[in-house]
Amino acid sequence: MNLRNQTTCLMAWATISLTSLLASCHGDYTFDPDVTLEVQQIAYDYNFRERFGDIDPEQNWGFDDMEVITVGDTVQTRATVTTRAANPNKNQWADFTTVPQEVSFQEAQDVYHFFRSLTPFAETGITMQWTDFFVQQVWEGQEEYTDGKGHTVKNVSNKMNHLVVGGENDHVNNFNNGHGDMMLMQNSSTSTFGYRNTVDSKYHYEHIIVYVPQYNAYYVGFDFYANGDNPNQQVERDGIYTDWIIKVVPANYHGMQRIMCEDLGDTDDFDFNDVVFDVSVQQSWWPVQGTFAKIYLQAAGGTLPVELYHNGERICEVHEAFGVPTTTMVNTTPDMVRPHVQFTVKVSDQAWGDVFNPNDIEIRVNNTEKGIIYTLSANSGSAPYKICVPSTVAFTAERENIELKYPKFRDWVKDSSQKFWE
Ligand SMILES: [Ca+2]
Ligand SMILES: [Ca+2]
Ligand SMILES: [Ca+2]
C-alpha cells in the first residue's frame, strides 16, 4: 500500500469513526449531507483502489472532446419547420452512420414465422421512443381477405401505401404497395406506425412491435383492415400481423461514445451499468441551426433515481424514461429488456466550430437511502463514478464486476493509453 492509499484508508477510518461517534451521541447528532457524501466517496475511492490498484494521475476516464459530425441534408416532410424526417440521400448515409445490412431471405422467413406463431390479436406491450432510425423492408403479405360484400380481396399488399411513422405527416419515402427497401429517418418518431389503405382511403395503425432475440432486433407487423362506409370498403381483421412487416434499426452514428456509471448506491460494486447512455454530437444548418446531442439511454442497472441534465435543463429520470418504477433495473438482466430511449438536446445555437464534451451531461443521483443528492464526476486521478468509451463497448450484466468482463480494466486505470476494450 502506498502513501496515498494509506492516507485514503486512514481518512476513511477517521471519517467513518467520526460519523459513528456523532451518531451514537443521540442528543447532539445532526444530519450533515456533506459528511455523509464524503464518507460514501472516501469508501468508494478506497474500495476502487483496493480492487484496481493505483490510478494514472493523467487518466481522464475517456472524457475527451467529441467529434461533431454532419449528418447531411434531409427532406422535410412535416408541417413544422422545427423538424425533419426522411433522409433519402442514400449515398451519404455511410458518411455519418453505420448502414444496416440488407435483410436476408432467411431473416425475412424467420421473422414472418415469428409473427405467424403469435396468437391472434397478440399484444407485446413494446413501444419505442426513437427519433433516428432506419426502416427496412422485411415482408410483403400474401393472405387473402373477404370484404363486406363477400368478395375475395387479393393482393392486399398493393393496397397498403404510404408508410408513416409518428403520425400521418412523417412519410417513410419509397415505402408503398406493402413494399420498400431502406430509409433513414432523422428527428422523426416511433410513437406509432401506419399506412394508407386504398380500400377505404384511410390511415390505419393496427400493428404490433416485436423483439426477435435471434436477430437482436425490433420489427413492426401490420394487420390489414378497412372500415369505410360502404360494404366493399370494409375488410375485417384476422389479428395476424403479417400483411406488411418492417424492421426498425436505430441510427448508429459514427464516433458515438458510451457513458457507463456507478451511482454510489453501494461503494464496492463496480459493474458500471447503473446508468448507461450513448452520445453523438451533430451540427445542423437546416431546418434548425445548431449543435445537437443525440442521447441514447441504454440501461438502468441501479435502483436509485438518476436524472440527466444539460445546462440545468432536465432531460429525463432514467427509470421513468424506460417506463418502469425506480426499483426496476432495465437491460442489465435478461428478464427486463426494453428498447433504448432516444433524446435530442440542443447544446449550442451555433452550427460550426463548437466542441462538446460528454462530461457536460450532468448525471444527478438522488440517493434516497442516504438522503443525499450528488452529481457523478470523473476527475483525473480519482476513482471515477462514470467512464466514457466507444459505444461499441458492451456494458456488463447486473453486478458483474467490470474486470470480469474486461480483464484489462486494471491496466487502463494505471495507464490511460492501455485501452481495456481494444
Ligand atoms: Ca392480418
Ligand atoms: Ca453499480
Ligand atoms: Ca448495477
Image (spheres, rainbow, N blue to C red):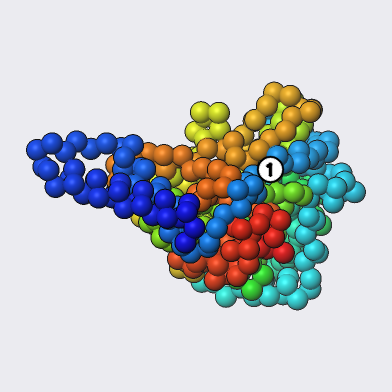
Foreground of the two, 324 or 291: 291
* Residue 385 picture location, percent across and down: 50, 49
Residue beneath the point at 48% across and 52% down: 4
Number of labels in the image equals 1
Residue 54 seen anywhere in this rendered image of the structure: yes
Q: Where is residue 234 in the image (x, y as percent from the top left)?
A: 61, 54
Q: Mark 1 points at which residue?
A: 64
Crowding at label 1, few (<14), some or many (≥20) Cα neighbours within 10 Å? few
Element type at mark 1:
loop
Observer-nearest residue: 121 or 264? 264
Q: Is residue 107 above or below residue 385?
A: below
Q: State the residue at coordinates (63%, 67%).
A: 408
Horizontal side of 175 relative to 143 (left or right) equals: right
Residue 125 seen from this side: no
Residue at the image point whose x is 83% and y is 36% from the top: 73
Residue in front for this viewpoint, 327 or 219 = 327
Q: Is residue 106 above or below residue 408?
A: below
Q: Which residue lies furthest to the right in this view?
A: 91
Amino acid beneath label 1: Asp
Q: In this view, does 96 lie above or below 120?
A: above
Q: Establish if 348 lies above or below 385.
A: above
On the image, which quarter does residue 78 sit in? top right
Figure quadrant of residue 139: bottom right
Looking at this view, is 198 or 349 the one in front? 349
Question: Quick one: which residue is furthest to the top in this view?
Answer: 349
Q: Where residue 330 sits in the image (x, y, percent)?
A: 47, 58
Quadrant where the C terminus sits is bottom right
